Amino acid sequence: MNQPPNPLDIPEILSRVGLFVPLWVYSDQNSGPNNNNRSRNRRPRFNPQHLLNCILVNRTWHHIFLPILWFTFDDISIPPSVFHPVKILIRHSRHLRIFELNHSSTAAIVTVIPRRLLPHNLLHLGLSGHKNHDWAKALMLQNTRLESLYWQGTSSGGDYHHREDEYETLDAKALSKRLRRLQDLHLEYWKLDSNFMKLLRRNPGLRRLELHFVTGELHHHQSQAARLDDQMNREAAIENDSDDDDDDDDEDDDEEEDEQGEQGKDDTDDDDSKVQLPYLTSLTVCKDIGSGALEELVRSCPRLEELSWMGSVDSDLKQLARNLQECCPGLSILTYSTVEVHQDESVYATLIQVIPRLAELQIRIPALGNRFTEALIKHASTLEILDLRILNPHENTHTNLRRILTSCHQITALSIDGWSRSDTDLFSFKWACLRLTRLFLQGLHDALTREGGQMTEADDNATVAAVYGWTATVLETDAAGSSGYIEEIGGEGQGGDETGTEDAAAEMIVRPYGGGAAHNNKVSTGFLNKLLSHLQTMKHLQSFMLNGVEYTRRPPFVYNTVNSQ
């Protein structure tokens, strides 16, 4: 009798089983209730031993599991000292679908490989940390199935102080001829021109677009006269070429004319005013000094849901608000932050008013005035995440904060930085946001209190926190913003792990674990008593940040009746 086949000999079953064989090891700090944004950005560690053992079973297993093993190459997670990138690319490039190059040393090794041996079937490509842009562009052009692209240009770092000539111009025209399937595009440190709109036009399936520290003009609206001049210049060039060539080269001339004519047709058809990205829901723009009118981009995104807009100055705020009102009715998540704030508080209020339904807001404002507060409260029924950074004091700051806290009952995450110091009346009334799960407060209270005219250091906050069932932990940061060491107040220190610094643009919005210097962490005993007593009613809040100190609620003590007998 014929025995039934072993399920593990069936390729379809094996390929499914291979997806569950552990290949990447994630840090323990990437999981758990108290993980933060930086831990989620850490790369997993490559651990191929289990798949390598599977590959050695037989030919069928080797054929099935090898493409799974080399589906991804990342020179951060896969150290070049252990797995030589040249050998991997030469032997397994046909299997690669995700390719990440982040180190200049790795890029220098990989660029010597002949182009025909490089991957041709990539779905995601990430390039940063090297300057050979011609090689990078060639790699992109031979991977026409790319759905996700991250490309970092040459720069000394994002500090809003670069000269315009420090950025190379992105060859968007060449990319637009080959890349038509992009869904996720992320560019950093590039100068953009009108051809960038051509790239967007050729990729209508884009769902997410991120532009960090970019300069240049997009020339979104080209005049009819300019388009007519371009067309006349192309026709004149074609006539001159045909008159100068000999009759024996007529066939070659015809081919050249066809090519130029096709190029002219593409240029004529690509009307920037008609660029539409109907599937794009997330747009991130971080303008550098010298950036053009990038706010016109939002007019091409009718289904935009999430917008993050950062830059050096807020001169584009009025036009951005107008474009959002006219073209983006579905926007619900907004981040707006600039280094220099010149616009009046009423202009920021207009930005909030033009959004029909606001669910998440992170914003840096000149002051918390009445107009902005009224515009914000209109979203009380939908607003769930609120991150306010208030630069200047206002006579009604305390009153307006009280209006927000008693009106916005849907808030689950709240961050406030820079409000009126030495004011504890905000804890004398009931907050409406009882569903609060995340809280970040900065600049609430002076680190030192006045007693008898003398400035004395505040009492030990850890002792006060322990009375209410909380544990206080300080997270130090250096000047660059990278994490340093963690120590428990009143306890032994805990070693911190190293992480890369966040982008400068991302640091403009205040985030948890971004506290100040250690001597500014403490607050007065009276202030902390009122705060912790007030937070006792918020059962969903398990931890919060106060002036750079993380307070974590201790789990309730359970009496063990078995051990007590």
Image: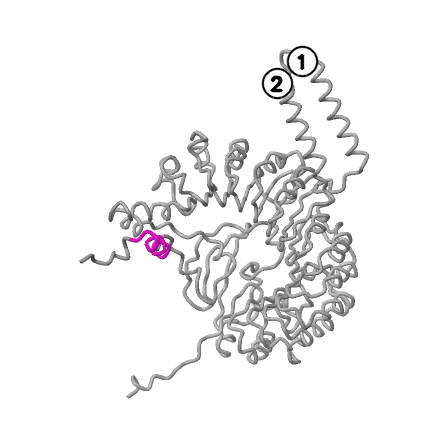
Question: How crowded is the residue under tag 2: few (<14 C-alpha within 10 Å), some, or many (20+)?
Answer: few
| Residue appearing at x 58%, y 69% in the figure | 439
Secondary structure at badge 1 equals loop
Q: Is residue 500 above or below residue 538?
A: above
Screen quadrant of the C terminus: bottom left
| Residue 245 image label | 1
Q: Which mark is residue 252?
A: 2
Residue 504 falls inside the magenta stretch: no
- Residue drawn at (73%, 51%) of the image: 314
Whether pointer 2 and pointer 1 mark residues with C-beta atoms closer than 8 Å, the reply is yes
- Asked which colour scheme the image uses, the reply is one colour
Q: Nearer the viewer, residue 369 or 546?
A: 369
For residue 329, side relative to residue 282 (left or right)? right
Residue 564 screen position, x and y as percent: 30, 86
| Residue 94 in the figure: left or right of residue 230 | left
Task: Give above or below for 112 relative to 221.
Answer: above
Q: Identify which residue is drawn at 55% across, 67% down.
A: 545
For the record, the magenta segment spans 10-20
The mark that comes first in sequence, 2 or 1, is 1
Cα distance in 3D space between marks 2 and 1: 9 Å
**Along the viewing direction, whichever of 53 and 346 lies nearer the viewer:** 53
